[in-house]
Amino acid sequence: MAASAWVVFSVLNLPNKYRKHNLILTVSGLALGACATGNRAFPTATEATPHVLGRATAAVADAVNAGADTLAPEPLRMARQRLVAAMAEEQGKHLDRAGLLAREAIADAGFAKAQAERIAAEHARAAAAAQLQQVPASGTPGSSGQ
């Protein structure tokens, strides 16, 4: 509070041509500062850390089920590392860091799953294109030339 009183006092001692602008800036800054330091103005990650860890574990499992262990090993490795780190932070009672790491693990696992699904789709498309090349080009199926 002493700092804000000093700021207001120093603004009032400025020459008249600067006083109005600096007073407006000072009041705006104090108002923003009051908003930012309000009662839980920004949500913390500690509120649902166990739930986030569960979602992270499920996201990693979904990525593995999608084939990310072979098709997208690097993003899956990052997701697993972050999940292990999140669990360690939770054990150490650092819930903010645990929640953040778990959310990062969810994002990494989602990326690994998407990359694995994309690669699997490309493989399926290539296989379908190879089968299509084997179909004779002489007419459509069902027309027997009668």
Image (cartoon, rainbow, N blue to C red):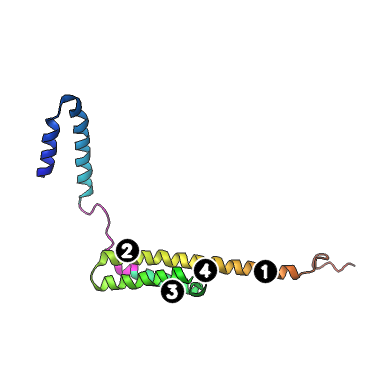
- What is the C-alpha distance between the residues marked 4 and 2? 24 Å
Magenta span: chief secondary structure:
loop
Dot 4 crowding, Cα within 10 Å, few <14, some 14–19, many 20+: many
Task: State the residue lying farthest toward the right.
Answer: 146
Query: Which residue does the image show at 43% across and 68% down from the upper left?
Result: 109
Q: Helix, strand or loop at disc 3?
A: helix
Which residue in the protein does label 2 denote? Answer: 100
Disc 3 marks which residue?
61
Give the mark nearest the N terminus, 3 or 2: 3
- Work out whether mark 2 precedes mark 1 in sequence or the reverse, and give the earlier one: 2
Query: What residue is shown with label 4?
Result: 116
SS class of the residue under badge 1? helix
Residues in magenta, as a range? 39-52
Which amino acid, by three-letter code, is at mark 4? Ala
Q: Amino acid at mark 1?
A: Ala
Q: Secondary structure at mark 2?
A: helix
- 4 or 2: tag closer to the N-terminus: 2
Instruction: Please tell me the numbered disc located at residue 128.
Output: 1
